[in-house]
Amino acid sequence: MSRFFPALFLAVAALPAFAADEVAQLLKQADAFRLPAESVRVETQVELYRNDALDKERLYTVYVKPGRRSLVLMKSPSEIGQKVLMLADQFWLLMPESQRPLRITASQKLLGEASTGDIASMTWSEDYAGSVKGETDCPPPPAALPELAAPAKPRRCLHLDLAQARNGVTYARVELYLDKANKQPVKADLYVGSGKRAKEAWYVATLVNGQPQIMTMLLLDDIQVNRRTVIRYRAITPKAAPDEFFNPAALVRNSLSGW
């Protein structure tokens, strides 16, 4: 036993130390797999499955701009005309029959485990800071889920422990696993302010123009294990929405028909 502790110390000491700016750079690299340009239009489909059967689905068009600005346009018949606006730490819900924006939070549920923050925000580097806990085997995906397949060969991951760096974010803490080789997001454990894990997220990449890009996010609930929420990014294209779309007062007077 006496020889175990020096060996353990050497193993821990051998782990590379990451400065705060290096962790920030890791997050920017991870963000690039989800947000390939500063201003984009994202066609998003959210599916709720119960016992492996599709229960509900919703369609959203999301415009993302620098400065933590996002506009979510609801496209499903039951929600048509509704909008969610994110400006830095603030969220508003705009209803077609009302001239008054309603303040909501990033954790407001849209469908299943998908919240407004999950749909509106696609970055970590602006919202979180933390440390690299170490290097580990990448977590194996849950079995028997059609959206997830075991990798062809084992991968090594960097395990990041992140805490919110600003108000208004969806989760107080995130444990994020990045593929060590290319910093592609693999999995995240998502925690609320009480310290309880709310859900886990899995990220699935697809080749787009020859480059891997996250096109599916799978959300699993710790309590309701018989259901899963799948967020599919059907298309992510560079496009900058006009700045006036990100003004709550102006937005209530604009239906954004055609957008």
Image: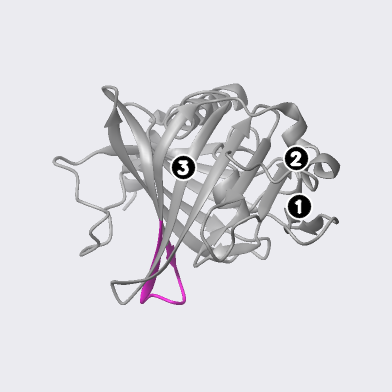
Give the residues in magenta: 220-230
Q: Which residue is mark 1?
A: 92
Comparing 54 with 73, the one in front is 73
Q: Are marks 2 and 1 in contact (CB under 8 Å)?
A: yes
Residue 43's disc number:
3
Q: Residues within 10 Å of mark 3 (few under 14, many from 20)?
A: some
The quarter of the picture where residue 104 lies is bottom right
Q: Earlier in the sequence, mark 3 or mark 1?
A: 3
Residue type pointed to by label 3: Glu
Residue in the image at 80% along x and 59% along y: 102
- From what the image shows, is residue 250 above or below residue 221? above
Give the farthest residue toward the left. 152
Q: Which residue is mark 2?
A: 87
Q: Position of residue 229 (x, y in %)?
A: 42, 62
Residue in the image at 34% along x and 26% along y: 182
Q: Is residue 94 visible?
A: yes
